[in-house]
Image (cartoon, rainbow, N blue to C red):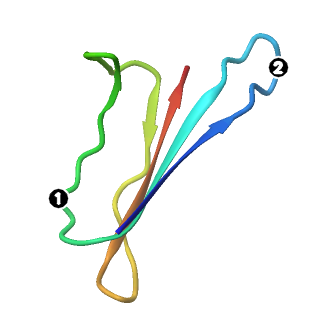
């Protein structure tokens, strides 16, 4: 499996920055991603794709967090 996290710059002064996590080529499909700041779980402003199946029987998904 492969995980990458990227900081996306704000699109304007009113729009916050965003963290994008890409989880690729994993199996089985019961993966879960949670964001934490220290010990506090961040649950607001999350956007996630559904788990997508690849041709090689692995899965992938993306999660975006506004910071």
Density class for disc 2 (Cα within 10 Å; few <14, some 14-19, many ≥20) is few
Local SS, label 1: loop
Mark 1 neighbour density, 10 Å: few (under 14) some (14–19) many (20 or more): few
50 to 58, vertically: above or below: above
Quadrant, the C terminus: top right
Disc assigned to residue 38 = none
- Residue at the far top in the pictured view: 14
Which residue occupies 23% across, 72% down? 27
Name above or below for residue 17 compared with residue 60.
Answer: above
Secondary-structure class at tag 2: loop
Which quadrant would residue 43 be assigned to in this image?
top left
Pinpoint residue 21: horizontal percent, then vertical percent. 48, 46
Quarter location, residue 66: top right
Q: Name which residue lies at 40% across and 80% down.
A: 54
Q: Which mark is residue 12?
A: 2
Placement of the N terminus among the 4 image quadrants: bottom left
**Residue on which the image places disc 1:** 30
Image coords of residue 40 (percent x, y): 28, 14
């Amino acid at each position: 499996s492969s995980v990458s996290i990227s900081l996306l710059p704000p699109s304007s002064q009113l729009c916050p920055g965003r963290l994008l996590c890409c989880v690729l080529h994993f199996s089985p499909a019961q993966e879960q991603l949670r964001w934490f700041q220290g010990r506090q779980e961040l649950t607001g402003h999350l956007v996630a794709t559904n788990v997508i199946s690849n041709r090689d029987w692995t899965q992938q998904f993306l999660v975006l967090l506004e910071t």
